[in-house]
Amino acid sequence: MEIQVFDSYEEMSINAARLVAAQVRLKPDSVLGLATGSTPLGLYAELIRMYEEENLDFSEVVTLNLDEYLGLGPDDDQSYAYFMREKLFSKINIDPDSSYLPDGLAEDPEDAAQEYEMLADMLPRDLQILGIGRNGHIGFNEPADAFPVETHVTDLAESTIQANQRFFDNADQVPRQAITMGMKQILAAKKIILLASGADKAETISDLVFGKVTSQVPASILNLHPDVMVMLDEAAARYLVEAYGFDDEDIAGE
Ligand code: F6R
């Protein structure tokens, strides 16, 4: 696991976008695994800028998102399908038919999860973007007694409902379930970039880097993957900076 610490969220986002852009330029038909939430917003904004100003071409790119809330369709402004359309897909030249998310409105969500697993088997990711929950989740793989393996229907942890209520009017409106890729598909990606920013992620990042591999910190499984880049802003890296005794000169982007 390689760790890069940047002096700001903006620097982190720009550097992550450079890696995604390099992937797309080297392999125009790359399959990208994407995440939603606050963390990748800066990355997506920079990719849009690169598309507009630097001819970054997404016409052959295929994307698969990690997860979707159950009960929310693509027209619901809280759905992840809507988020991806608003924050990225409608602003670049990606083919909407090549951008996949689990179906939040599926009549049979278990079937939909299995279908998404098969789709993901057919479209192995060249590069997977991840955020991380304060509780250590990746996708919606919540802390549990075992690592979930395949794409599945999951109950959101209470801590996730609390964390995500900021996007809704109140906690009651946060869906209680989601379809999420499991660890098998996340680890199947050739390369993984995990982004984290802000002081509220510092403790879980410390667990990820210094702790054991445990299903109670789902992201810790990334320690078993051969090509993971963890990109952090200073606030999220706080405990690493203290532990390693980094000074400002060690922080990338200074
Ligand atoms: C979203 C996802 C989640 C988020 C995580 C962090 O698709 O899979 O694991 O990455 O909850 O969310 P933010 O970035 O909003 O802190």
Image: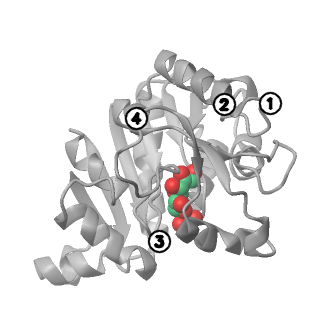
Q: Residue at x 79, y 66 (%)?
A: 173
Q: Would residue 60 be visible to someone looking at this image?
A: no
Query: If you read the primary sequence from the N terminus, does the residue marked by circle 2 or circle 3 appear first?
Result: 3
Q: Amino acid at mark 2?
A: Ser
Crowding at mark 4 (Cα within 10 Å: few <14, some 14-19, many 20+): some
**Does 43 sit above or below residue 187?**
below
Q: Amino acid at mark 4?
A: Val
- Extreme front residue here? 145
Query: If you read the primary sequence from the N terminus, does the residue marked by circle 2 or circle 1 appear first?
Result: 2
Q: Which mark is residue 9?
A: 3
Pinpoint residue 233: horizontal percent, then vertical percent: 38, 72
Left or right: residue 225 compared with residue 115: left
Task: Give the alpha-carbon distance from disc 4 to disc 2, as whole Å.
Answer: 23 Å
**Does 105 sit above or below residue 11?**
above
Q: At numbered mark 1, what does the secondary structure look like: helix, strand or loop?
A: loop
**Does 119 sit above or below residue 80?**
above
